[in-house]
Image: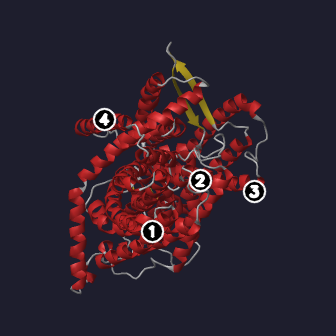
Amino acid sequence: MNAVPGPGANRAELTVRGLIIGIVITLVFTAANVFFGLKAGLTFATSIPAAVISMAILRAMKNATIQENNIVQTVASAAGTLSSIIFVLPGLIIVGWWTGFPFWMSFGICAAGGILGVMYTIPLRRALVTDSDLPYPEGVACAEVLKVGSGEVVVASDSAAVEGGTAGLKAVVVGSVVSAVFYIVVQTKLFASDLAQYFRIGDRGAASGYDFSLSFALFAVGHLVGLWVGLAMLFGAIIGWGWAVPHFSLLHPATGDVADVAQGVWSHYVRFVGAGAIGVAAIWTLAKLVKPVVSGLTSAMAASRVRKAGKGDTLPRTEQDMPIGIVGLIVLICMLPIAYLLGHFSVISGLASHTALLVIGGVLFVLILSFLVSTVCGYMAGLIGSSNSPLSGIGILVVIIAALLLVAGLKSDLPADSGKALVAFALFVTSVVFAVAAIANNNLQDLKTGQLVDATPWRQQVALVIGVIAGAIVIPPVLDLLNKAYGFLGAPGVDPAHALPAPQAGLISALAQGVIQNNIDWSLIGIGALVGAGIIALDAILAATTKSVRLPPLAVGLGIYLPTSTTLMIVAGAIVGWYFDKRADRTPKAEATKQLGVLLASGLIVGESIIGVLVAAIVVFSGKPAPLALVGDGFGNAAVWIGSIAFVAVTFAMYRWIARLGRNS
């Protein structure tokens, strides 16, 4: 059994081998996350599976420590964060401005924005981690996994000693294999990819429907985010498909296939209602964070004064951040490539006559707004986890503000045909801010994990910068690969039947076009804002009158504007995960069993996502939209039944197995 080194012990932490292992895991997980995010509209946090994989590798090496394992998962966590740039960057393809992803421009956005995000989380760490009671579900879970894998005894709430690094690795591997095999069978078309039905309601012909995607990755996301987030998304889906879709289909009647009608109404009307709800919830969150953020900045300055006085050694290891002076210098250095990118983009987009204004305004926009959105994202990641943090809602707010500023400051001085260039610039500057927010979304989870395993914050912050650069290298070619294989829904010349939905990129692009072309229906966003305000009030009432019942407003907003093919399976996973945990509470090793459930879910996400990228490569090189298909479309009805029954049976078998593994670990 390994003991945790004391505060003054010399132990391995930021090592070359740890960085190399972390970079390799980052490259794989980034590719998987890019594909999954474009398909499902959600990215997954990679810290836990990365920690398990690194434990398995480092156990075979000498002198490995829990802190070195933590550095590996810290580097790899950049995959779960920076890949969220896919919520904005494909918008430049969707609006027809780009036909591919220029490597150096895409890399520059991801790298400069990502490093800026690391710097912004340093003062935020004190406000949102050290001096906060936020739960950080994924950060705490990752710390527990690291402790178990290092051979420490973790005393569970039931006073049972939990050990089981081998069992945890089994859970991740089995989950990965099961989801990968199921996904491959779906690609053969022997199993359907979803269980969907659309229908008319009443005599007036209102449309609605539902769509359960037979995806173990989505199911696993539900397990990880928990019951109340899942039910909040269900509530949002009910608002969207129980009220909004039927309502707007009556206001805007259309003929044709009922599925096309329902999906069209949701895409053109209901998603904007969800955008309004998410925007209000994000603003509310920001307003609540002013005081703790100011306090965190004050603490960081105080720590800097201690170092300058030559007393840095008196600070606890877990309070040794990168010095605030160096943070400020790196922030300023990051602004140089950002300024160059903004200037270069303005020139090639035909806005050269206003380059100075666009560069100066753009840099100030990035500098100020990215700090504000980092605060919101960090808070929400701490509250409900990185996987369900409101990055999409943040992107919506940022692109609307950027577009409004461009309209107010430039549009009247430009030719009438410059609207498309302004839309492209709005998306471009939003993507930089979004890269910052994406990193801040998960970094605080990592820093919480580090706090719990006695890690050194500045070493983690260096590791995060390295992870950002590694992720920035792999994102552009993976995006290019997926664009050539499938394309993005709404892009010129793309087959909608095979295109990746890229729901957030499509919505954010539509908002930028609507604001700049002055054809956005603000009433829809207003309705969503009222819904969001009502949900905020309801959540406050629940918090004041119940012990655990909550209705996270941002999760409700996500439920409104994400397709039911995403939300309903997440809800199913949340309910099954809650039931599994309740059953585990009755067993002698409750905490061990729950941890194994988390690791199984992490494996389910990783397996499907990685195979998804490999299948995309096969599509590109084969030139066929369904290269693995063994049967034709005529097998569809049978595939729905077979796939649905197989999904339920495999789920039941996996959870029974993991429960037994927990009892025997």
> Closer to the camera: disc 2 or disc 4?
4
- Residue 151 seen anywhere in this rendered image of the structure: no
How far is disc 1 from disc 4 in space, using C-alphas? Answer: 39 Å
Mark 1 is surrounded, within 10 Å at the Cα level, by few (under 14), some (14 to 19) or many (20 or more) other residues, namely: many
Image coords of residue 596 (percent x, y): 51, 52
Pointer 1: what residue?
343
Camera-side residue of 298 and 94: 94
Badge 1 amino acid: Gly
Q: Secondary structure at mark 4?
A: helix
Lower sequence index among marks 3 and 2 = 2
Q: Secondary structure at mark 2?
A: helix
Q: Is residue 380 left or right of residue 646?
A: left
> Closer to the camera: disc 3 or disc 2?
3
Mark 3 is surrounded, within 10 Å at the Cα level, by few (under 14), some (14 to 19) or many (20 or more) other residues, namely: few
Badge 2 amino acid: Phe
Residue 621's label in the rendered image is 3
Mark 4 is surrounded, within 10 Å at the Cα level, by few (under 14), some (14 to 19) or many (20 or more) other residues, namely: some
Indicate whether 210 appears above or below 117: above
Residue 530's label in the rendered image is 4
Lower sequence index among marks 2 and 1 = 2
Pointer 2: what residue?
35
Image quadrant assignment for residue 304: bottom left
